[in-house]
């Protein structure tokens, strides 16, 4: 058994842990515990991304998902209540219908997915391979992710920066920037 | 209000400079290792947020005024777009970095362009994260330890 065969069992373990945390988040009523478990979910996702060799994504997930999001969710939780309200059975049933329908759709689409690590999959044969081949000669930096993000797809990244700006602006418009101590008084 | 937790304060004072240095490392080393403006921005913002969590929001506002966050949010996007317009003026296409330096074989122009746009990304991400944190934290009443 080669090394690459062994790492897939890490993936299974991480996915099982994510499933357990997901179930725990649904079952719990204490919002503080839910927020903390969401942070743990992000951290395990980050570990999983590293196991999948997507180190840049894992880094982002650990910093944004497990770090900043947890703090922001805690702040949002303090503005509401510490406990979740009980939901009626009817709403549970409606959510179950949506979840089962979406899940069934995803399982149906699974047949069209390329095999994990397939060298002939669209992601590995199209323009992606070109970026990997040409980065060393055109951009002359070792990190292909940075080359694609900042140079080949620089225009997209500019859009992303404006999206982040728009997100900040949206929060500012909704609840104010909290600049002065009692801005809304 | 000064936090009564001595250990937290001491540990935070040691950690925050390291977090900031690490943030800049992630930023300027983004061409060679995982990371870049987005991740570095979040790491830098987390340093300020940690400071606010330990020493209180008012102290954090003295260190990083909300006004900076408001200006920085827009400034980062402006820096990014400016790099594109400078490359236009220098005779290239929008965001074509090769025009910044004649040494195409070593990709010097690309390096300059990537670092410049990443500075824009870093500024926007840091300031937006801090601004959102200020927006949420500014509305939360001070809570005592017993409330948890």
Image (cartoon, coloured by chain):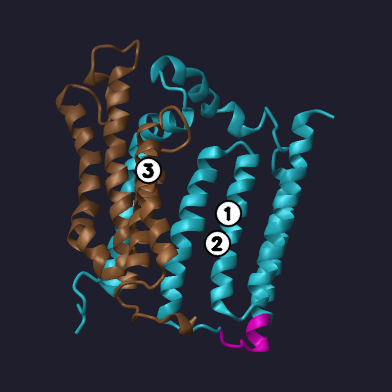
Residue segment shown in magenta: A84-92
Q: Residue at x 47, y 27 (%)?
A: A143
Chain under label 1? A
Alpha carbon separation for disc pair 1 and 3: 19 Å
- Neighbours of disc 3 within 10 Å: few (<14), some (14-19), many (20+): many
Alpha carbon separation for disc pair 2 and 1: 6 Å
Circles 2 and 1, Cβ within 8 Å, touching? The answer is yes
The one of B142 and A77 positioned closer to us in this rendering = B142
Does label 1 lie on the same chain as label 2? yes
Chain under label 3? B
Q: Colour of chain B?
A: brown
B41, above or below B105, in the image: below
B131, above or below A174, in the image: above
- Residue A96 appears left or right of B118: right
The reply to whether residue B18 is in sight is yes
Q: Quadrant of residue A147?
A: top left
Q: Residue at x 24, y 12 (%)?
A: B102
* Mark seen at residue A75: none
* Mark seen at residue B23: 3
- Residue A124 appears left or right of B53: right
Q: Colour of chain A?
A: cyan
* Mark seen at residue A43: 1
Residue A89 lies in the magenta-colored region: yes
Circles 1 and 3, Cβ within 8 Å, touching? The answer is no
- Neighbours of disc 2 within 10 Å: few (<14), some (14-19), many (20+): many
- Neighbours of disc 1 within 10 Å: few (<14), some (14-19), many (20+): many
Q: Residue at x 30, y 67 (%)?
A: B134
- Disc 2 designates what residue? A39
The one of A110 and B142 positioned closer to us in this rendering = B142
- Residue B60 appears left or right of B39: left
SS at badge 3: helix
The one of B122 and B50 positioned closer to us in this rendering = B50
């Amino acid at each position: 058994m080669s090394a690459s065969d062994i790492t897939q069992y890490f993936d299974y373990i991480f996915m099982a842990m994510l499933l357990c945390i997901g179930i725990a988040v649904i079952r719990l009523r204490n919002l503080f515990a839910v927020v903390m478990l969401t942070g743990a979910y992000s951290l395990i996702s980050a570990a999983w991304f590293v196991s999948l060799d997507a180190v840049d994504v894992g880094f982002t997930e650990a910093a944004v998902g497990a770090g900043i999001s947890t703090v922001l969710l805690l702040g949002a939780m303090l503005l509401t209540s510490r406990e979740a309200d009980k939901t009626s059975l009817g709403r549970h049933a409606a959510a179950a219908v949506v979840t089962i329908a979406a899940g069934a759709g995803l399982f149906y689409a699974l047949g069209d997915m390329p095999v994990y690590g397939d060298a002939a999959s669209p992601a590995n044969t199209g323009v992606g391979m070109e970026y990997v081949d040409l980065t060393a000669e055109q951009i002359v930096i070792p990190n292909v992710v940075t080359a694609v993000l900042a140079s080949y797809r620089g225009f997209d990244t500019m859009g992303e920066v404006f999206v982040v700006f728009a997100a900040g602006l949206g929060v500012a418009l909704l609840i104010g920037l909290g600049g002065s101590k009692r801005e809304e008084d | 209000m000064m936090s009564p937790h001595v250990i937290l304060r001491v540990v935070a004072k040691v950690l925050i400079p390291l977090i900031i240095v690490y943030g800049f490392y992630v930023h300027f080393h983004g061409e060679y290792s995982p990371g870049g403006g987005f991740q570095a921005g979040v790491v830098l913002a987390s340093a300020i947020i940690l400071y606010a969590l330990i020493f209180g929001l008012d102290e954090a506002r003295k260190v990083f005024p909300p006004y900076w966050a408001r200006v920085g949010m827009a400034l980062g996007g402006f820096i990014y777009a400016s790099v594109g317009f400078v490359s236009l003026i220098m005779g290239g296409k929008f965001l074509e970095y090769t025009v910044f330096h004649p040494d195409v074989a070593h990709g010097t122009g690309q390096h300059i362009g990537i670092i410049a746009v990443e500075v824009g990304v870093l500024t926007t991400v840091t300031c937006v994260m801090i601004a959102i944190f200020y927006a949420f934290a500014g509305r939360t009443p001070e809570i005592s330890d017993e409330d948890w």
